[in-house]
Amino acid sequence: MVEIIRLIESWLMPPGGTLLLILLALLLAPLLRRFSLFLVGVAGLVLYLLSTPWVMFQLASMLEVVAPFQQIPEVNEERLAAIVILGGERYTAAPEFGEDVVGKSTLERLRYGAWLHKRTGFPILVTGGTPLGEGVPESRLMADSLWRDFGISAVWQENQSINTWEHAHFVPPILKSKGVSTILLVTHASHMSRSLRVFQQSPEMEGLTLVAAPTGFTTAGKMDYGIGLWRPSAGALSKNVTFLHEWGGMLWYQLRYPN
């Protein structure tokens, strides 16, 4: 099921969607030449706009609305806190490592989670299973990375979840069993709004306090000003596809998990 959803998504999101639009134009060309040229123009314009930093910053401003983490919550023996890092992606069969390792987005979250751990001393829980039937859960890859890359051991793991909704349902019981009452939730800034909504609506969260700790904000480089905002950029295209994926995720969760 996950494979089918991701396959459909790949053809709806750019560049798949724009390629389908061009294909439709080619099929209609013998009968509707002007209309087919119009479709090609629309596809080209959409692809260009999605490649610009200007659109990237517009989408970021609508998604990255949760402020960075600021104040460390008070804890004591009866009120413990933990850092929960959501899985993002894996780097499958990495040839230089000889095995699966965490992907770029997951590594960014781990870096911030490790920074928070060293600043607060709070324990870490990583969460992520095997959505495509991989041999090793992502949570294990995350725990391995925290040890190898950041020198953090004794990491708690939740290894059954395959999406954000399942993170929100499988993680709280583990934390409650360990006496934790406050969660510092680490995920990307663009993913935080959906994550907060899902966690807050989870019945398993009863009795737990949720604190947002977003990372990976979209920031402007030296080229991202003036005419530079309108230059085509592969990085901006990749980021914008990620943002569109998040919008699609929000819509899907509204339909799939309305409560």
Image (tube, rainbow, N blue to C red):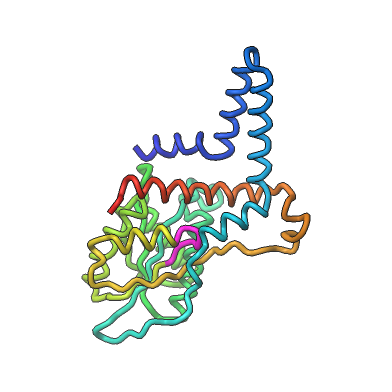
Q: Quadrant of the C terminus?
A: bottom left
Percent position of residue 224, x then y: 72, 59
Count of numbered tags: 0
The residue positioned 46% from the left and 75% from the top of the image is: 116
> Given the current orientation, which residue lies at the most extreme left position?
177
Front residue of 95/236: it is: 236
Left or right relative to 46: residue 89: left
Above or below residue 56? Residue 156 is below
Residue at point 35%, 85% (across, down) = 74
Query: Residue 212 at what x, y percent from top left?
Result: 42, 70
Indicate yes or no whether the magenta region holds residue 90. Answer: no
Q: Quadrant of the N terminus?
A: top left
Magenta stretch in the rendered image = 186-192
Q: Is residue 217 left or right of residue 129?
A: right
Q: Residue at x 45, y 62 (%)?
A: 187
Q: Measured from the top left, where is residue 214 in percent x and y?
A: 48, 67
Q: Is residue 24 above or below residue 123?
A: above
Residue at 53% over, 51% down: 243
Q: Nearer the viewer, residue 85 or 232?
A: 232
Name the residue nearer the viewer: 162 or 35. 35
Location of residue 58 by image quarter = bottom right
